[in-house]
Image: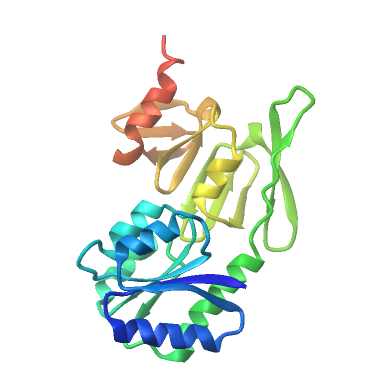
Amino acid sequence: MIRCLVVDDEPLALDILVDYIEKVSSLELIKATTSAFEALAIAQTGEVDLIFLDVQMPELTGIQLLKIIKGKCRVILTTAYPQYALEGYDLDVADYLLKPIAFDRFYKAVSKVQQQIQEKPVIIPEKASSGVQDFIFVKTEHRIQKIYINDILYIEGLKDYISIFTPQERIITLQYMKKMEEALPSDIFVRVHKSYIVAIPKIESIERGRIQIGDKIIPIGDTYREGFFNKIQDRNI
């Protein structure tokens, strides 16, 4: 059962989504509200799996709310303005519904979320006898693959997928960057951009806000710049 929260400052739009949710047996409505602040409070409890989130709201926009909750649950954006689609996908939304929302399009979006949940990759950190994390398992298309921590050069994210790069291969898995970031040892790996996590020992050079690992040049995002340089400060001489 997918626990749903609906937030839209238009009561009619709210009622339509509530009606659609009630028609799908795998969905459970937790709350429908016209208040973005009430929705934010509920989302932060971790009691919902999916938010149907309007973009244009007077108190707090959907994009602002989405940035605050930072991946606590999956989000489907709902709006009458298609120009918000690209920004929404940059923030890892599950889907984007353009108003007026037809039931078949709603159902397609919900099915996509269900598939993501069912196919959620296995990420199992393992610890060596010394207590230091040694490798992880990730689910690829056809198998669960073991990846040694020391082999990872960097990780690149694109929407719901990530690519894990090692000297030997590129491994693609259906996963969020935040989940991968949490699974990796923080003393070795650091998020340097919304789309990149790097292994600190693999960095060859840093110049003009860019990191070089092998032949790859990785940008340092403004949001992550301070945290990155603070983390490597102790290694400077």
Instruction: Report the front residue among 186 and 28.
Output: 28
Indicate the quadrant where residue 56 lies.
bottom left
**Residue 36 percent coordinates (x, y):** 31, 64
Check the image and report above or below for 210 versus 130.
below
Can residue 3 be seen here? The reply is: yes
- Is 33 on the left or on the right of 5, as rendered? left
Q: Position of residue 163 (x, y in %)?
A: 55, 51
Q: Measuring 33% from the left and 30% from the top, which residue is drawn there?
A: 226
Depth check: 40 or 116 in front? 40
Which residue appears farthest toward the top when viewing the image?
237
Picture quarter with the N terminus: bottom right
| x, y percent for residue 35 | 30, 68
The image's colour scheme reads rainbow
Q: Position of residue 189 (x, y in %)?
A: 53, 33
| Nearer-the-camera pick, 121 or 44 | 44
The residue sitting at 48% across, 40% down in the picture is: 197
Residue sticking out furthest to the right: 129
Quarter that holds the C terminus: top left
Name the residue rendered at 32%, 84% in the picture.
13
Q: How many marks?
A: 0
Q: Is 180 left, or right, of 124 in this rendering? A: left
Residue 93 or residue 29, whichever sits in front: 29
- Residue 103 vertical position relative to residue 221 in the rendered view, above or below: below
- Residue drawn at (31%, 87%) of the image: 12
| Residue 127 vertical position relative to residue 43 in the rendered view, above or below | above
